[in-house]
């Protein structure tokens, strides 16, 4: 014999569980590549012959901080929402009404 289920009063909802997933798309890789290119330009500026020059002592550190601290982290954390749908992560349940005969 099958067990009779007790009726459920009200609506039963399931909490949405979000996991930390970093999905890298082509745009992410392009931004990270841009950061690497800017970083190489900063090292090229630092390679100047003059130790007391303006380019290796002022501009190169600024360019490297921008590459390491802004562009590359932005490339890693950028979420491309144009290609994915928002419905794949949502969980919905319909209310369950069980009557006992």
Image (cartoon, grey):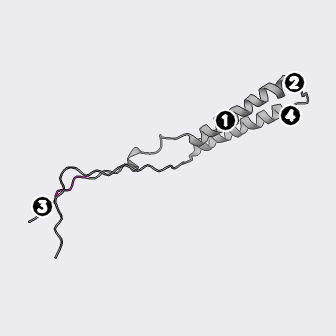
Residue 96 is situated, as x and y percent measured from the top left of the image, at: 20, 56
Left or right, residue 33 beside residue 82: right
* Quadrant for the N terminus in the image: bottom left
Q: CA distance from mark 3 to mark 2?
A: 85 Å
Number of other residues with Cα within 10 Å of mark 3, as a class: few under 14, some 14 to 19, many 20 or more? few
Q: Earlier in the sequence, mark 1 or mark 3?
A: 1
* Quadrant for the C terminus in the image: bottom left
Q: Residue at x 55, y 39 (%)?
A: 78
Q: Earlier in the sequence, mark 4 or mark 2?
A: 4
Q: Is residue 79 above or below residue 51?
A: below
The label on residue 8 is none
The label on residue 47 is 4
What residue sits right under mark 3 in the picture?
A: 99
Q: Earlier in the sequence, mark 4 or mark 3?
A: 4
Number of other residues with Cα within 10 Å of mark 4, as a class: few under 14, some 14 to 19, many 20 or more? few
Residue 40 is situated, as x and y percent measured from the top left of the image, at: 77, 37
Quick check: marks 4 and 1 in contact, CB under 8 Å? no
Left or right, residue 26 beside residue 101: right
Give whichever of 49, 100 is nearer the camera: 100
What residue sits right under mark 2 in the picture?
A: 53
Residue 53 is situated, as x and y percent measured from the top left of the image, at: 87, 24
């Amino acid at each position: 014999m099958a067990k009779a289920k007790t009726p459920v009063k009200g609506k039963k909802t399931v909490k949405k569980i979000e996991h930390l997933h970093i999905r890298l798309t082509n745009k992410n890789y392009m931004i990270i590549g841009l950061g690497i290119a800017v970083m190489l330009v900063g090292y090229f500026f630092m390679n100047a012959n003059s130790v007391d020059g303006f380019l290796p002592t002022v501009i190169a550190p600024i360019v490297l901080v921008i590459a390491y601290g802004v562009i590359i982290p932005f490339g890693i954390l950028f979420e491309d929402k144009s290609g994915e749908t928002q419905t794949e992560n949502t969980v919905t349940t319909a209310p369950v009404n069980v009557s006992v005969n």
